[in-house]
Image (spheres, helix red, strand yellow):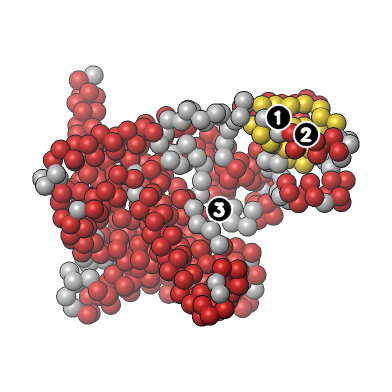
Amino acid sequence: MNLVKNNIFRCIKEPVCFTFLASIALSLIAIFGVVTIGKDGALYVDVARSITSEGFAVAFDKFNWPWYSILIALVHSCTKIDHEIIAYMLAVIFMAGTCSLLVSMVKNKTPAAVYWAVLLVLSVPVFNEFRGSVIRESGFWFFIVLAIWIVSLRSEITFLQGFAIQLAIVCAALFRLEALFVAPAILVYFLFDGNTLFFKEKVLNIFKTFIIFIILFLFGAIAVFWMDLLTQPRVAKYLHLINPYAVYESFSLISDKFAQVALRKWSHSDAGVIVFFGFLAALIIRIISYAGMFSFILLDSVGRKKLIEGAKTYKLNLFAAAFYICVLFIFFFQSKFINSRYISMFLLLSIPIMSVAIHGVKDKWPKLINIFVIVSVLFMFANVITTSTKKTHYLEAAQWVKDNTEFSDKIYYDDSRVAYYAGRGYPDLPAVEEVLESKSHKENYEYFVIESDVDDKFFLDWIEKNNFKILSEKTNGKKTLYIFSR
């Protein structure tokens, strides 16, 4: 018994082990506060269940990049644990692994800053707020950080390490295809790594790290034309996103619309500059706001100086973050939006650099640093403890659907999670505005389950005007799910 206690205390004192355990604890707290799974999570679990019951052939019919669901299904086939529980377990493990690898990275290079890395990785809001979510990003984050961690272990790469790096990149790409951004980052790092003095060594590192990729690329180039792999929806989408001409067209379209709507004709030529730097400023502001308490470190000259010092120490992280910014920028122009999940990868890559910056200012501002620690710990728990209204009405509506309708009935769900909890899968349905405004869409369904504000007079009048009959109302006090039919 004493041996077990000693091992536990030793593990807690070791920063990497402590981070792993603390991450698991925070994720479990977040999950225990969850009432309904997220939309993305419901889709992945539903696809995994379909794979288990119908075979792998159905995977790509339901989702065009189903590898996460395939992993869940494979784990289920080995353990017989419920698919949803497996999905949460994987999310917890991937998050804990990501946090531990980042702390290990700092421990190896700048051990004096390691506990600041522990604090940051457990408290920065932008990725910690997803601890209770089933999202593909958790695996994407883990394998990207794993690839960078392996590269950072030593200046001379072995063939075994090279294989592990390539495997990690492939695994990351199976979660999100944009993970391939890390390959050119590693390539640039090897070319400009000051620790490797001789050009021959740099070339050998590149060869050992990318030999399998080079071989696969050659075979892949043949397969692309032979098997027409470019038509695979997810691959085709990403090729369109990174197509320079498509990016230029998207940028031009935004600039032209902005010029026509907001600028006088004499300023139309400035529209492109305004849009470009406007997007850049929006991205920077998002990153700074998502960084949590660390943003205040940038106000101090020593903090900025140490941030540059950290960037020099963690060059690979810097190069990876720079390439990922390019990915974000392309996505911003092509998709016209950006969110916290996408920006999280940038901040995860920056954790080691940020740790050096905080360590550099701790002696200059000891009292402020104490406040920084206290507020960061509060952020840590605020990320996983929510007091917002739970979506219990989704479960109640799902039960009503289960008890009062047949599986063959045509039902429109404003949120497909109601169908998920009713045991009706996770249907891919048109937007609610499209359904409500289209007569043909309205006639395609026998029942409607649509969410609105409590006692929304406009929506209730619309139901009455269109001769619908409200069959049931399920509310959580903030929102109401109206179930109605003709």
Picture coordinates of residue 186, whole percent (x, y):
33, 67
Corner quadrant of residue 301: bottom left
Tell me the quadrant of the picture where the C terminus can be found: top right
- Between disc 1 and disc 3, the foreground one is 1
Picture coordinates of residue 387, whole percent (x, y):
47, 28
Q: In this view, does 146 lie above or below 479?
A: below
Of pointers 2 and 1, the one earlier in the residue sequence: 1
Q: Which residue lies furthest to the top in this view?
A: 1
Circle 2 Cα neighbour tier, 10 Å, few/some/many (<14 / 14–19 / ≥20): some
For label 1, the residue is 455
For label 2, the residue is 460
For label 3, the residue is 67
Amino acid of disc 1: Asp
In the displayed structure image, the side of residue 23 where residue 251 appears, left or right: right
Circle 1 Cα neighbour tier, 10 Å, few/some/many (<14 / 14–19 / ≥20): few
Q: Which residue is drawn at 18% across and 40% down?
A: 368
In the displayed structure image, the side of residue 246 where residue 92 appears, left or right: left
Circle 3 Cα neighbour tier, 10 Å, few/some/many (<14 / 14–19 / ≥20): many
Q: Is residue 6 above or below residue 278?
A: above
Q: Disc 1 on helix, strand or loop?
A: loop
Of pointers 3 and 2, the one earlier in the residue sequence: 3
Whether residue 111 is visible to the viewer of this picture, yes or no, is no
3D distance between C-alphas at marks 2 and 1: 8 Å
Q: Residue at x 64, y 42 (%)?
A: 46
Amino acid of disc 2: Leu
Q: Which residue is drawn at 48% across and 59% down?
A: 173
Q: Are the residues tagged 2 and 1 within 8 Å (C-beta)?
A: yes
